Image (cartoon, rainbow, N blue to C red):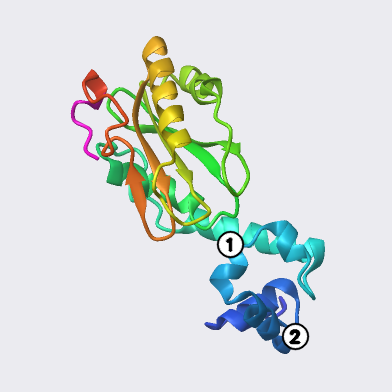
Amino acid sequence: MSPSIPVPTPAGDIELLAALLGLPLTAAATLLDRVGGVTALLRAHPADLARLPGVGAKRAVRLTAAAQLGRRLADPPEDTRAPVLDARGAHAHLAPALHGLPDEELHALYLDRRNRPLERRRLTVGSDRFTVVDPRQIFRPAVSLGAAAVVLAHNHPSGDPTPSPQDREVTRRVAAAGRVLGVTLLDHLVMGHGGWVSMRETGDLDTSEPLAANWTA
């Protein structure tokens, strides 16, 4: 006979954290109380996690991996090949992987001529304040995928989704490079805690290009 495997029952944050890290319930409860809850714990930088009592480097890696998996499973688009026709549709594809990250990351959603998704990629990882953006990093995958358009998104770990002057400059520079290559930058989304901004809506992108004509911010 095969060994009996207990079926997990619904558990609270303390029980789940204890099971994930192999900690006693009292230690897991103390850890959550110290950092301010499970949301703050999963948003913390791995280096900060490693310094917490009872965590260390190995458990910090485990926590970070669990947070990444959770973000990837959250709110997946119902049909990943359905055309993406507006900023809200792009947000559904891009937001889950950017939620709650401790550092700024730039992601891209590449689309074909019918605005159907070809691939989503993480392009750069920066610090808690900014990430360096090179248009070549954005358009090299676009060319290899045969993409006609791209939507960019990055997060602001501060929580405020208001585009910075650097965000605006980078967006204009990337859009200009895309025009040379024949790949339209449809939008650039900035994600914060509980909110996001379309940089097409803020007027930082040219809406006269053919592929952008029907795009809705």
Question: Of the numbered discs in the image, which one, if any, rests on residue 109?
Answer: none
The alpha-carbon separation of the residues under discs 1 and 2 comes to: 22 Å
Q: Is residue 48 left or right of residue 104?
A: right
For the C terminus, which image quadrant?
top left
Q: Residues within 10 Å of mark 1 (few under 14, many from 20)?
A: some
> In the rendered image, which quarter is residue 65 located in?
bottom right
For the N terminus, which image quadrant?
bottom right
Residue 129 location (% of width, % of height): 57, 46
- Residue at the outermost left position: 214
- Residue beneath the point at 53% across and 53% down: 157
- Residue at the outermost top position: 180
Q: Is residue 7 visible?
A: no
Q: Is residue 130 visible?
A: yes
Given residues 202 and 108, the one toward you in this image is: 202
- Residue beneath the point at 64% across and 79% down: 32
Residue identifier under label 1: 43
**What secondary structure predominates along the stretch shown in magenta?**
loop
Residue 74 location (% of width, % of height): 45, 59
- Residue beneath the point at 51% across and 18% down: 144
- Residue at the outermost front position: 165
- Region rendered in magenta: 212-217
Given residues 4 and 136, the one toward you in this image is: 136
Q: Is residue 71 left or right of residue 109?
A: right
Q: Amino acid at mark 1?
A: Arg
Q: Which of pointers 1 and 2 lies earlier in the amino acid sequence?
A: 2
Residue identifier under label 2: 24
